[in-house]
Every structure is written in structure tokens, then in C-alpha cells.
Image (cartoon, rainbow, N blue to C red):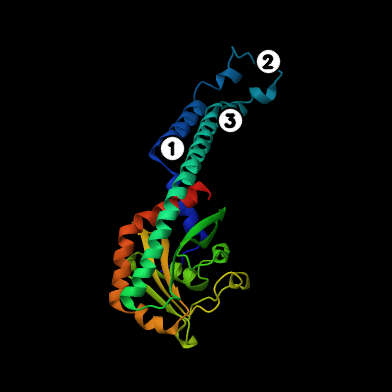
Amino acid sequence: MRPKNSAYYEIKFWLSNITPRSILFSCFIIFSSVVVGLGDAQSFFTGDSSPIPESWTTLKNKRNARIIATCFIVLPGIAVLISDGLEKKKQFEELSRITKDFTFPHLETKLNEFCEDLKKSFGLSNEVRIYIAIPIRKGFINWKIQIVCRSRNVIDRELYASFEFGEGAYGYAFNTIDKNNQHRTLTIQLMPPSEIPSNYKHLSDNNKSFVKSDLIGFLITPSFEKDFLNGVLIIDTSDPSDMSKLIQPRLQSHVLDWLGVDTQVITLLWRMTTYGNW
């Protein structure tokens, strides 16, 4: 399995922006430029009846005339594509902000309710927390994993942590989970140290200052859109007594069933965060 990285999500990001309309329009631009470049449009510059003075040798050059004639078709087409893309981006950002205002409170309420349900149903301690982390685009080929939605016992400070792919439990999960195990949970245990996976990468010093320092274990459940991993639901704890319960098949099945209902919501979170610039 190839580890995921910023380039992987950057490709997904740009492929998601490609629509049949933009493909057809791009093909039209290319076809038109070829026709114009090889056709009679250049005669405006080089023909016998051309209004261009003979002394303007640069424009009279056939090669230059072909390039300029082609630009007359290509540049307006590119301008239209860019303008259309910017307008759609603006509209999506506005819709994104509205959706966030309605989606986040609802989802965080459900996370709190589910957290309480797990405590009562499986005897988990009050140290158990639940949150959702997704890849967020910080810039060109620059993606980080961040918490975007959480139960009330996840402190605000942790929302500022940005994890590299492969870093910590979240980064390890993104590099480990693929489409072949998208309906399974992943358990990561940090205590005792012998239980830590061999390819586990510890948190950077910067992220250590944000993340709760006494966490000892994680139960991570992936959210997929078809074959694309767009987020993870994380249950963590700092109480050793919780670990034996988090590895129980019955509890893990319960978590998978719960997330199965809300996978669409996590997909919406990823799309709105990625294209809405939250």
C-alpha cells in the first residue's frame, strides 16, 4: 500500500474540479486553436490584403502570425474558464459558510450523545473523547490533518494542531487504512511502549503543545467516499481501563454502525472545508 501524502490529496482536489463542461470547453479551445493556427486567420497578418504594413516585419512573419492568431482563440477561452471558476468558488464559499453554521452544531450534538451512549453501554470512563479529523488544504501540495468536529471534552487548543501524514495516531491511520479495510476499525495503543506500531511517528514538538499529553489509546474508524478516504472518527482515552473495552468486537461494530449513518456528513465536511476555505 502506498502511503498517502499531500500530493495524493492535491491530485484528488484538482480532479474533483474537473467537470464534463470544462473538459468539453477545453477541447473546443484546443480544436479551435489548431484550426485557426493552421487556417486562414493568419492571413490577416500575412495576406495580400492585410492591413498590416509591410514594414512591420515581426507581424508579417508567418510563424509569429500563427502564434498571435492562435492566442486570439486560446486566451479568451482561458479567461472565461478562470472567470467561471472564480465565480463558482465564491458561490461555494458562501454556501459553505451557511452549511457550516447548521452542520457543526448538529454533528457535535450527535458526537456528545454518542459519547455518552458508549460510556453507558460499554462501561467506558469519563476520559473517553470523540472527534472527527480530515485532511485540510493549507496551500499548493500542502495538506495537513486537523480536528474539525469534537465532543465537548476535547479542548479548543487541540483544534490548532496540524498533523503530517504519518504523524501521530491520525497520520498513522491515514497511511495505514486503505479501501480494502474501509469497513474496519483501527486500534492504536501507546502504553505500554511495546504496543506502539514499529512505523508509528511520534508527534512533532509543536503539536505536542496542543494535544492532550496523557492519551494512551485510540480507536479510529474511517470514512470513505467510494475508494477515497476523506476523514476519520476517533475515540481516544487516557484511562488504561478503557483499552480492553475499545478492542471489543461488539463495541467496534457499534461504532461502525453509527458512522455508517453519518458517512455522508463527513464527506460533506471534507468537501465544504476543502472548497469553502473554512
Q: Which residue is at the front of the view, 10 or 216?
A: 216
**Marks 2 and 3 close (CB-CB < 8 Å):** no
Most extreme residue toward the top, as rendered?
49
Measure the C-alpha gap from mark 2 to mark 3: 18 Å
Measure the C-alpha gap from mark 1 to mark 2: 39 Å
Q: In the image, residue 33 lies at what x, y percent? A: 50, 30
Q: Which residue is at the front of the view, 157 or 144?
A: 157
- Label of residue 22 in the image: 1
Residue at 38% from the left image edge and 39% from the top image edge: 20
Graded by Cα atoms within 10 Å as few (under 14), some (14 to 19) or many (20 or more), the crowding at tag 2 reads few
The answer to which of marks 2 and 3 sits earlier in the sequence is 2
Residue ID for mark 2: 53
Graded by Cα atoms within 10 Å as few (under 14), some (14 to 19) or many (20 or more), the crowding at tag 1 reads some
Q: Indicate the amino acid at tag 1.
A: Ser
Residue at 41% from the left image edge and 59% from the top image edge: 109
Measure the C-alpha gap from mark 3 to mark 1: 24 Å
Q: Indicate the amino acid at tag 3.
A: Ile
Q: Is residue 178 visible?
A: no
The answer to which of marks 1 and 2 sits earlier in the sequence is 1
Between label 1 and label 2, give the one nearer the viewer. Answer: 1
Mark 1 falls on what kind of element?
A: helix
Q: Indicate the amino acid at tag 2.
A: Pro
Q: Which residue is at the front of the view, 232 or 21?
A: 232
Mark 2 falls on what kind of element?
A: loop
Q: In the image, residue 225 lies at what x, y percent? A: 36, 56
- Label of residue 48 in the image: none
Q: In the image, residue 249 lies at what x, y percent? A: 29, 77
Q: Can residue 12 be seen in this view?
A: yes
Mark 3 falls on what kind of element?
A: helix
- Report the side of 49 relative to 240 (left or right): right
**Marks 3 and 1 close (CB-CB < 8 Å):** no
Residue ID for mark 3: 67
